[in-house]
Image: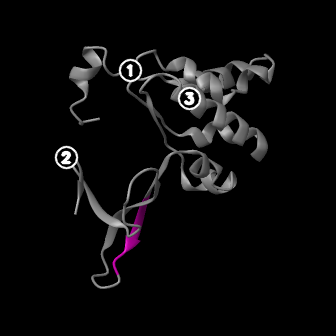
Amino acid sequence: MGLGLTKYYEKGQLTIERSFQNRSEKVQTSKFGFTPEGLEIDLPTLSDYVPEGTDVAVIDNIGVFTLRLSIQDFRDQFDALNFILSTRGDCTAMFVMDDIACKMTHNLAEYSASGSLRLMVDENPYTGNIERYIRIPKMRRTCLSLNPIRFEITSSGIKLL
C-alpha cells in the first residue's frame, strides 16, 4: 500500500484478514452445486477475525455484508458486533462503510457508533478545483468543528490542510 506498514505486519502487530475474499470464494463454490447458506454472514462473527489484545480493529467495507439484511437485522447485528469488540479491553473499532450502504441502512451505523468520519470530494466554487474534504459529524466526548476540513492524499499519507 505504500504506507510503511510492512514492519508492523512482519512483527505480527498488524494482521489483514481477507473475510470478503473468503466470502467470494464461497460464492464461487456455490455456483458448482452447493447450497447458498454459506453465503450469509452474521456481523457479530466478524469479531472472530480480531485476535484478543488488538488495540485497533478496522473492518473495511462493512456495507458489503449488509446487502441481504433487513434494517432491523442490520441494527441488531451491528450493535452486537460493536458491543463484542467494546468488551475486548481497549480495542477501538473502526468500521468503513460507503455512502450508499449507509443510506440503505438509514444511517444506523452512524447512530450506533461512537464517531463518524465522512470523506467527500467537492468542487471549490472559488477556484473550480476538485478538492477532498473530511467532515466529522460525530465524535463522542470531543468538541470538534462541524465544518469540513480540506485534505490531500500524499505519498506519505493524508495531510490535513
Q: Within the image, what quadrant is residue 91 found in?
A: top left
Query: From which residue to which does the magenta span run?
Result: 119-124
Residue under the image location 61 percent in, 39 percent down: 64
Q: Tag 1: residue type?
A: Thr
Q: Tag 3: residue type?
A: Phe
Position of residue 145 relative to residue 26, above or below, is: below
User: Horizontally, is 58 left or right of 126 in the view?
Assistant: right
In this rendered view, identify the residue nearer to me: 96 or 68.
Answer: 96
Q: CA distance from mark 1 to mark 3?
A: 15 Å
Q: Tag 2: residue type?
A: Ser
Q: Residues within 10 Å of mark 3 (few under 14, many from 20)?
A: some
| For marks 1 and 2 on the same chain, the one whose residue lies earlier in the sequence | 1
According to the image, label 2 marks what residue? 155
Residue under the image location 18 percent in, 44 percent down: 156
The mark found on residue 20 in the picture is: 3
Q: Within the image, what quadrant is residue 125 found in?
A: bottom left
Q: Nearer the viewer, mark 1 or mark 3?
A: 1
In this rendered view, identify the residue nearer to me: 4 or 26.
Answer: 4
Percent of width and height locating residue 47: 56, 23
Residue under the image location 40 percent in, 65 percent down: 121
